[in-house]
Image: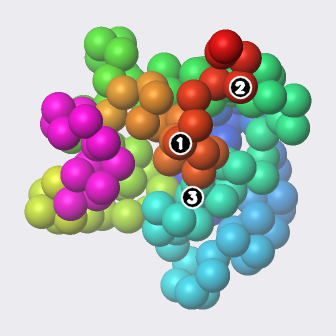
Amino acid sequence: MADLANIFKRLGSELSLEQTSEILKVIDANNDNYLDMDEWTAIMRNSVSHDPEEYLNQLKTAFNRIDTDGDGFINVEELTKLMAAVGQNLSSEDIELLLSEIDDNKDGKIGFEEFRVLMTGNGNESENED
């Protein structure tokens, strides 16, 4: 539980262990005390701003914190660390499968746009574009 609270803290949301526990109870659909990718994205969708511009900024902040080498992409190593931090110690085969499901352009890494689509469930371009 402390790991999940620390993740929220690193993403800019100060939650107590009690708040984190309550979120886990609500989001952990299969009651296994671990978060799978669907449960994780549900948490992120529910813990961010409802203002579209602020939400996009929060997503960028989260992405940049996951992208520990700062190259603008989430690679296999960073995805593995993220999944371990949320209680999912996945095999390298499972990480590759997860990456392939998220990596729409099949370049072997997750760019911000792919991350945004994952987190929002919205494949449309930004609403601000003409």
Residue at the spot x=30%, y=63% of the render?
Answer: 89
Query: How many other residues sit within 10 Å of disc 2, few (<14), some (14-19) or many (≥20)?
Result: few
- Front residue of 126/47: it is 126
In the image, residue 115 sits, relative to residue 95, either above or below, namely: above
Based on the picture, tell me whether residue 73 belongs to the magenta stretch.
no
Please state the horizontal and vertical placement of residue 84, each as a whole percent of the image.
36, 54
Q: Is residue 64 left or right of residue 72?
A: right
Residue 69 visible in image: yes
Outermost residue to the front:
130
Question: What's under tag 2, amino acid-wise?
Answer: Glu
Question: What's under tag 3, amino acid-wise?
Answer: Trp
- Could you tell me how far apart the alpha carbons at marks 1 and 2 are, in whole angstroms? 11 Å
Element on which disc 2 rests:
loop
> Which of the labelled discs sits on residue 72, or is there none?
none
Please state the horizontal and vertical placement of residue 78, each as a whole percent of the image.
30, 36
Mark 2, residue position: 127
Q: Is residue 53 left or right of residue 40?
A: right
Give the magenta range. Answer: 97-109
- Could you tell me how far apart the alpha carbons at marks 1 and 3 are, in whole angstroms? 18 Å
